């Protein structure tokens, strides 16, 4: 198949493109930076340079490639995030999830793309009820103000893709990435903060995180591209874990001191309401559907072994 990957030089894209090429697909990789042409060639893709927020550029790029499948992996998340100003930090990504999604869908419809696979996020779920959510569970209906634009943008992306009746729309709700090209890898931002005891457990640390190695996320994406059907899939590992569990384990693996515990109100001063939610209220996700319907199984079934490998 001919596959068009928007966001081909991101953390997922760099893992995804070589896997698609190895599987025999013709890959066209889109980036907005002309300097990344050679990287795309090295990965095995036909380089495509276009600004995802320019509808005409996107239409021309997709029109030239005429892909069978279009993959939307566009984000612009900064390496270091100031949680007190999350709305500002995620504003570029929110535009890519709204305007960028609309441009890609319009271009895809014009050339008759038969499958459209988009990056979602497993942190979208409501912060009430079960600790571990399935795909039919609702999105957060009342996010804190700092997180509201993020949730709205993710919901926009999902609805636009799933409601596109002319193609097979698939949304992959990825868990928290770790591994090459992410902030949770050797020398990355998060391990360094943990080593310096600047990543404390807030309150009881009751938020449940679902992780996924970027290589496993790429494998699930290949499966969705090749034989996924319309709908949403959680792409996470087998072991959702509370912050109070995984954060001390990460510190132990790093040989660092045990993370400090900080009351919620102190954490709010340092990390804002969004930071408190992420550490105390988020819900995890189940990967049962992706394993059952995509025939996918993560090579790193638990973050415990995955962290050590990364």
Image (cartoon, rainbow, N blue to C red):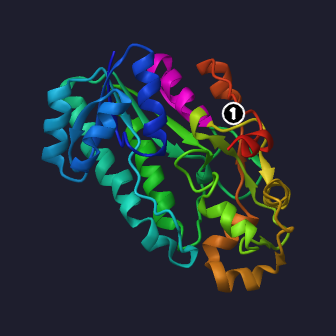
- Quadrant hosting residue 47: top left
Q: Is residue 168 left or right of residue 291?
A: left
User: Is 88 rendered above or below residue 28?
Assistant: below
For the stretch drawn in magenta, the main secondary structure is helix
User: Is 21 rendered above or below residue 124?
Assistant: above
User: Is 112 rendered above or below residue 104?
Assistant: above
Foreground residue among 3 and 23: 23
- Quadrant hosting residue 200: bottom right
* Residue that carries the numbered disc 1 in the rendered image: 287
User: Could one spot residue 130 in this view of the protein?
Assistant: no
Foreground residue among 197 and 103: 197
User: Could one spot residue 161 in this view of the protein?
Assistant: yes
At label 1, counting other C-alpha atoms closer than 10 Å, the crowd grade (few under 14, some 14-19, many 20 or more) is many
Residue 95 on image: x %, y %: 34, 58
- Quarter holding the N terminus? top left
Q: How many marks?
A: 1
Foreground residue among 117 and 21: 21
- Quadrant hosting residue 37: top left
Residue at left 45%, top 15%? 23
Residue 262 on image: x %, y %: 81, 79
Q: Is residue 176 left or right of residue 259?
A: left
Residue 266 highlighted magenta (yes or no):
no
- Quarter holding the C terminus? top right
Report the span colored magenta.
216-234
Residue 53 on image: x %, y %: 24, 53
Q: Is residue 85 left or right of residue 252?
A: left
> Tag 1, which secondary structure?
loop
Residue at left 58%, top 56%? 183
Q: Is residue 136 left or right of residue 206?
A: left
């Amino acid at each position: 198949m001919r596959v068009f990957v928007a966001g081909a030089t991101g953390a997922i894209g760099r893992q995804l493109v070589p896997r698609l090429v190895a599987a025999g697909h013709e890959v066209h990789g889109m980036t907005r930076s002309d300097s990344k042409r050679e990287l795309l060639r090295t990965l095995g893709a036909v380089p495509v340079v276009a600004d995802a927020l320019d509808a005409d550029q996107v239409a021309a790029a997709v029109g030239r490639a005429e892909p069978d499948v279009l993959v939307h992996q566009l984000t612009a998340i900064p390496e270091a995030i100031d949680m007190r100003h999350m709305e500002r930090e995620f504003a570029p990504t929110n535009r890519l999830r709204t305007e960028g999604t609309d441009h890609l869908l319009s271009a895809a419809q014009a050339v008759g793309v038969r499958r459209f696979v988009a990056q979602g996020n497993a942190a979208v779920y409501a912060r009430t009820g079960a600790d571990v959510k399935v795909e039919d569970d609702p999105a957060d209906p009342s996010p804190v103000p700092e997180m509201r634009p993020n949730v709205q943008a993710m919901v926009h992306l999902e609805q636009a893709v799933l409601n596109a009746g002319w193609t097979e729309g698939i949304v992959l709700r990825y868990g928290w990435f770790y591994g090459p090209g992410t902030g949770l890898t050797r020398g990355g931002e998060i391990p360094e903060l943990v080593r310096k005891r600047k990543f404390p457990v807030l309150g009881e640390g009751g938020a449940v995180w679902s992780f996924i190695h970027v290589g496993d996320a790429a494998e699930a994406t290949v499966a969705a591209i090749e034989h996924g059907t319309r709908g949403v899939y959680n792409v996470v590992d087998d072991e959702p874990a509370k912050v109070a569990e995984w954060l001390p384990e990460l510190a132990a693996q790093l040989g660092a001191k045990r993370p400090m515990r900080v009351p919620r109100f102190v954490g709010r001063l340092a990390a804002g309401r969004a930071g408190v939610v992420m550490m105390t209220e988020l819900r995890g996700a189940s990967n049962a559907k992706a394993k059952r319907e995509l025939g996918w199984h993560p090579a790193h079934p638990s973050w415990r072994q995955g962290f050590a490998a990364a």
